[in-house]
Each structure stands twice: as C-alpha cells, then as structure tokens.
Amino acid sequence: MNTLFIYVYSRSKYIYNNMKHLLYTFILITIFSSASAQTNLYENPEFDEIAKSHKNIAIVPFKTQVKLRPKQMKDITPEQLDRIERAEGESIQSAMYSWFLKRKKRGKLESIEVQDPKTTTALLKRNDIDYDNITDYTPQELANILGVDAVISGEYETNKPMSEGASVALGVLFGFFGSTNSATINMSVHNAADGVLLWNYNKKVRGSIGSSPEDLINILMRKASRRLAYTKND
C-alpha cells in the first residue's frame, strides 16, 4: 500500500512539474509573440474633418506576397504562385469589407457606404484594371474610377496563406494546411479629391494569429479602428 501511494504521489508530482513547465513556456512564447509584433500608425491631422464629407468608400484587392520555403518555391510554378497570391489578396479585400459591415450592423460605423467588392471588381475590369496592373494607377485615379470619396488599398505579406483557395492549393501541392504564423499588412486610406494620404496602418504579427482572413483582419483592426475616422469608438 505504501509503495503504491509513493508511486502515485511521485507520478502526480512529475505531471504537475511538467504542466508547470509547459505553462511557463506558453507564457514566455505569448510574451515574445506580443513583443515581436510591430505596429506603425499614421493619421492625417485633417482626417476627421475630411471624413465628414465622405459618403462612400471602396476597398481594392491587396497586393500580396507569399514567401514559401526554398524547397516549396522549387516545386511551384510562377503561375501557381500568382494564383495563390491573387486569391489571398482578394480574400483580404473581402474580409475587410465584412469587417466594415459588422461594424455598421453594431452601429459602430459612421454614415458611409462601403462598396461591395463585386462592384469594385466589375468597375475596375471595365477600365482594364485587374490585380496584375492595379499598382500602375494612383489611389486617386482608382477612387475616381470607382466613384467613391476614398479608397482603401494595401500590401500583404505572409509565409502561409489563409484564404480557402490558397490553402487548398498549397495543401494539394505540399500537403500542409493551417493558419498563418507570420504576416505583415500595410493598409492605406487615400482621399479621392486630391489623392492625399489620410491614414496608414502597418502591422507585423507572429505566432498563431487566426484561421481565416476574417480572423486576421479582426486581430489587426482591433486597436487600429480606434483611430480610423469612419468608425465609432466602443
């Protein structure tokens, strides 16, 4: 009996110490991930005043760069990589649109309309503008073509895409799925009237940051939205 008690006690102590070690490791990883996140936010001093006259805004596809491992890059064609990056950029556009709609539903969005990405894509296509050549046009030109008061554009860099189309493609090619563990987003708001930069948000995050583009946008916009003139603070 005493032998059994000693054994059970020893095992319990062993498990407890290991759990404690894992907990400490998790805390350190969380702290490191938070510390490694980099954020830069610029707000035009006149943004609040200029935004008062805005009635509608549009979000264009984000230019995306997917940085795969060297071995993976050897096993993928430029055409496949282009399709993956295009899908990821369009997914970020759609996720941003959904974020604005949710804010509006909760009464956290000022009286502006956000153009549906399908409408944006159609209008751009009529002017022979697509994902490949969109950076040849200034934000002011894009805003005027889309008939909006401001345009949201940006760049997105990741090492493991999260959009459904891109994830499936990579899963078939390399056998892995899952969420991004490193991502950088650089987002800007430009005024249509004069092309002036009204707002810029650049953030880099590491670690487990979500399982979908919607999750990523929610995480990235959690703090930045407090300084975005179109949204009401919680």
Image (cartoon, grey):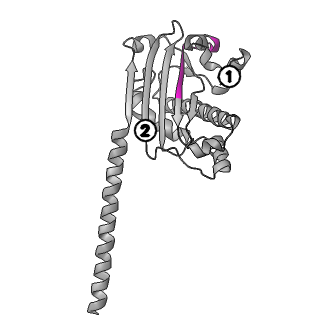
In this view, 11 is above or below 82:
below
Q: Is residue 174 magenta?
A: no
**Residue receiving disc 2:** 205
In this view, 4 is above or below 169:
below
| Cα gap from disc 1 to disc 2, whole angstroms | 28 Å
Q: Is residue 148 magenta?
A: yes
Q: Is residue 52 visible?
A: no
Q: Foreground: 222 or 60?
A: 60
In the image, residue 57 lies at what x, y percent?
Answer: 55, 19
Quarter of the image for the N terminus: give it.
Answer: bottom left
In the image, residue 34 lies at what x, y percent?
Answer: 35, 42
Quarter of the image for the C terminus: give it.
Answer: top left
Kind of element beneath mark 1: loop
Q: Report crowding for label 1: few under 14, some 14 to 19, many 20 or more residues within 10 A (C-alpha).
A: some
Give the quarter of the image for residue 228.
Answer: top left
Residue numbers of the magenta segment: 145-155
Give the side of residue 80 with respect to residue 141, left or right: right
Q: Earlier in the sequence, mark 1 or mark 2?
A: 1
For the point 41% across and 14% down, which residue is it? 47
Q: Is residue 152 visible?
A: yes
For the point 31% across and 62% down, which residue is it? 21
For the point 66% across and 33% down, which residue is it? 82
**Residue receiving disc 1:** 130
Give the side of residue 234 with respect to residue 13, left or right: right
In the image, residue 200 lies at what x, y percent?
Answer: 44, 21
